[in-house]
C-alpha cells in the first residue's frame, strides 16, 4: 500500500488493558482547565496509564516542563522494559467509539508514511492539512517527540468516502472474523466507551488496499495527484512528526544509510485513526475563541463594524447558544459587564463564506493592536460560558461547520484558518490507546 502512504502498524497494548484508567483524552483538550487534568490524575492513581506518557498542553508553558518531559521518557522506557505491554500486534485496528451523546464514531487505526503528508498550503500531497499550521507551535512539541521511545496517536485523518468503502467495510470484515476485541471498555470522566478489533490476515489487509485504490481513483485530480486524506485532528502533532522525521532523515542520510534503511526507520511513520467524513457519528463542531485582557465592549464594536453586522443583547445563555447554532453567519459574545453580571450579545452578519474564515483575520488584526490581550481556542459551549463569565475575558461562540464540499474547498483554496473546526465535543476527542515503538 506504499502508493497510498499506508502501512500495517505494529501496535503495543498493555496486558489486561483497563480502558478506564489506561486511556486519556488528547493532550490538546481542556487547555484552560487544570481541574480536569487533576481529576484525571486522581482517577489514574498508580495504574499504568497513557497519562504518564504524554504532556497535557495545560502544562506546556509551566516552568517544570523539562522535568515533565524527562519523566515522560523515563515512563516510556519503564513501560517497555518492565512488562507493561504485551507482544506487539501487527494489524490494522477497526474501532468503534461510543460517546456520551449517543453517537458512535467508527475508525481505522493505521500507520502513514510522513513523506506522503504536507502541511504547507496548496500541496498536492496524499495527506494535507485542513487548517493553517502555526509554525511556532511545532518546536515545543518536537522536544517531546524527538528521541521518544514510543508514540501515542491522537491524530485523526478524514477520508472522502461517500460509499463507505474503507472504514465501514473494515468494520464488517473485522467483526466477521470471529476474533475477540483487543480492547473493550468504558472511558473515564463519563466519556463513553470504546471497542477495537484487529484486521491482520492477508485477505483482510488486501481488502483495505482495494478500498484505498477505489477511493484514490475517485479523488484523483487532473494533474494526477490524489487528495486522499485530510487532517481532521492533531494537525500540529502530525506536523511535528514530519519535522522530527525530516531531522532524522537528514541524520540517516549524512551517516550513509541506504535507501532501504531509511525506508525502514520507524520515525518515517506515524500512527493515526482514519475516519470517514460522512460517518454519521462524526460531528463537526466549531472551535470557539476566548480572549483575555481586553475591553469587551470595544472589541465587540470593532468586530461588528468590520464584519458589517448587527448587534443585539439577548437574555440568556440558552437563547444565545440557540441563535448561533441555528445560523451559518452569527457570532455570540459572553463577558462580564461593568456590574459583574454575565452579558450575552449576538452579532448577526451576512457573511456567505465559512464564518471563521472571515472572523479570524479580523480578530488577528484587532489583537495585534492590543498587545496585552491573549487568545485561546476552546471546545464546547460549556467552556464558552464558564470562561466568558470571568473578569477580563470574553468568549466568542462560532456557528456550526458543514461537511459539504469540505475536500473540494481545501483542494481548491488551501487550508482553512487555524482552529476552524473540531470533530465533536471535547470529551468525544480521540483517547490515547494504541502505542507504537519510535526511537530505539
Image (tube, grey):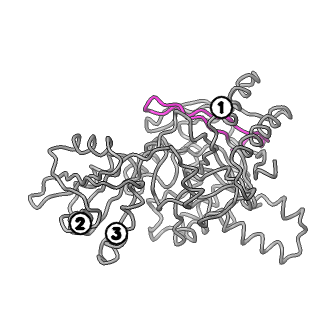
Residue 73 is a magenta residue: no
* Label drawn at residue 26: none
- Residue 440's spot in the image, x, y percent? 77, 60
- Residue 19's spot in the image, x, y percent? 57, 36
- Image quarter for residue 77? bottom right
- Image quarter for residue 169? top right
Residues under numbered marks 2 and 1 in contact, where contact means CB atoms less than 8 Å apart: no
Query: Neighbour class for label 1 at 10 Å: few (<14), some, many (≥20)?
Result: some
Could you tell me how far apart the alpha carbons at marks 2 and 3 are, in whole angstroms?
21 Å
Could you tell me how far apart the alpha carbons at marks 2 and 1 are, in whole angstroms?
47 Å
On the rendered structure, is 97 left or right of 251? left
Say what secondary structure mark 2 lies in: helix
Q: Residue at x 69, y 32 (%)?
A: 182
On the rendered structure, is 45 left or right of 269? left
Residue identifier under label 2: 305
Residue depth check, mark 2 versus mark 3: number of the one nearer the observer? 2
Q: Earlier in the sequence, mark 1 or mark 3?
A: 1
Query: Neighbour class for label 2 at 10 Å: few (<14), some, many (≥20)?
Result: few
Q: Earlier in the sequence, mark 2 or mark 1?
A: 1
Residue most extreme to the front: 222
Say what secondary structure mark 1 lies in: helix
Residue 103 is a magenta residue: yes
Which stretch appears magenta?
84-108
Numbered circles on residues, count:
3
Residue depth check, mark 1 versus mark 3: number of the one nearer the observer? 1
Residues under numbered marks 1 and 3 in contact, where contact means CB atoms less than 8 Å apart: no
Residue identifier under label 3: 374
Residue identifier under label 1: 168
Query: Neighbour class for label 3 at 10 Å: few (<14), some, many (≥20)?
Result: some
Q: Residue at x 78, y 48 (%)?
A: 7
Q: Is residue 93 visible?
A: yes
Amino acid at each position: 500500500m506504499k502508493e497510498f502512504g499506508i502501512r500495517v502498524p505494529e501496535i503495543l497494548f498493555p496486558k489486561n488493558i483497563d480502558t478506564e484508567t489506561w486511556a486519556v483524552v488528547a493532550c490538546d483538550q481542556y487547555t484552560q482547565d487544570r481541574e480536569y487534568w487533576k481529576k484525571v490524575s486522581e482517577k489514574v492513581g498508580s495504574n499504568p496509564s497513557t497519562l504518564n506518557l504524554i504532556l497535557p498542553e495545560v502544562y506546556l508553558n509551566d516552568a517544570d516542563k523539562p522535568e515533565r518531559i524527562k519523566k515522560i521518557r523515563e515512563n516510556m522506557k519503564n513501560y517497555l522494559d518492565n512488562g507493561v505491554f504485551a507482544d506487539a500486534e501487527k494489524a490494522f485496528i477497526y474501532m468503534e467509539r461510543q460517546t456520551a451523546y449517543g453517537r458512535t464514531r467508527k475508525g481505522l487505526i493505521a500507520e502513514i508514511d510522513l513523506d506522503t503528508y504536507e502541511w504547507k498550503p496548496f500541496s498536492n500531497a496524499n495527506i494535507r492539512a485542513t487548517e493553517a499550521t502555526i509554525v511556532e507551535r511545532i518546536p515545543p512539541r518536537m522536544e517531546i517527540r524527538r528521541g521518544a521511545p514510543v508514540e501515542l496517536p491522537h491524530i485523526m485523518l478524514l477520508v472522502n468516502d461517500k460509499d463507505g468503502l474503507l472504514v465501514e467495510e473494515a468494520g464488517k470484515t473485522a467483526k466477521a472474523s470471529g476474533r475477540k476485541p483487543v480492547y473493550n471498555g468504558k472511558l473515564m470522566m463519563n466519556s463513553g466507551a470504546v471497542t477495537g478489533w484487529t484486521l491482520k490476515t492477508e485477505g483482510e489487509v488486501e481488502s483495505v488496499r482495494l478500498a484505498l485504490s477505489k477511493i484514490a481513483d475517485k479523488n484523483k485530480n487532473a494533474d494526477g495527484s490524489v487528495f486522499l486524506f485530510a487532517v481532521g485532528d492533531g494537525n500540529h502533532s502530525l506536523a511535528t512528526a514530519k519535522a522530527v522525521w525530516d531531522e532524522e532523515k537528514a541524520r540517516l542520510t549524512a551517516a550513509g544509510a541506504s535507501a532501504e534503511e531509511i525506508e525502514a526507520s520507524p520515525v518515517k511513520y506515524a500512527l493515526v485513526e482514519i475516519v470517514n467524513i460522512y460517518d454519521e457519528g462524526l460531528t463537526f463542531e466549531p472551535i470557539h475563541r476566548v480572549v483575555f485582557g481586553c475591553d469587551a465592549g470595544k472589541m465587540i464594536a470593532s468586530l461588528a463594524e468590520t464584519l458589517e453586522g448587527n448587534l443585539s443583547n439577548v437574555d440568556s445563555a440558552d437563547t444565545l447558544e440557540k441563535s448561533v447554532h441555528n445560523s451559518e453567519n452569527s457570532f455570540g459574545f459572553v463577558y462580564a459587564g461593568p456590574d459583574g453580571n454575565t452579558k450575552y450579545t449576538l452579532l448577526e452578519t451576512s457573511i456567505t463564506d465559512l464564518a471563521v474564515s472571515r472572523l479570524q483575520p479580523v480578530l488577528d488584526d484587532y489583537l495585534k493592536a492590543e498587545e496585552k490581550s491573549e487568545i485561546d481556542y476552546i471546545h464546547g459551549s460549556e467552556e464558552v460560558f464558564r470562561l466568558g463569565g470571568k473578569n477580563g475575558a470574553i468568549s466568542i461562540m462560532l456557528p456550526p461547520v458543514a461537511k459539504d464540499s469540505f475536500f473540494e474547498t481545501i483542494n481548491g483554496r488551501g487550508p482553512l484558518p487555524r482552529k476552524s473546526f473540531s470533530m465533536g465535543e471535547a470529551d468525544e476527542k480521540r483517547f490515547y490507546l494504541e502505542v507504537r515503538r519510535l526511537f530505539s
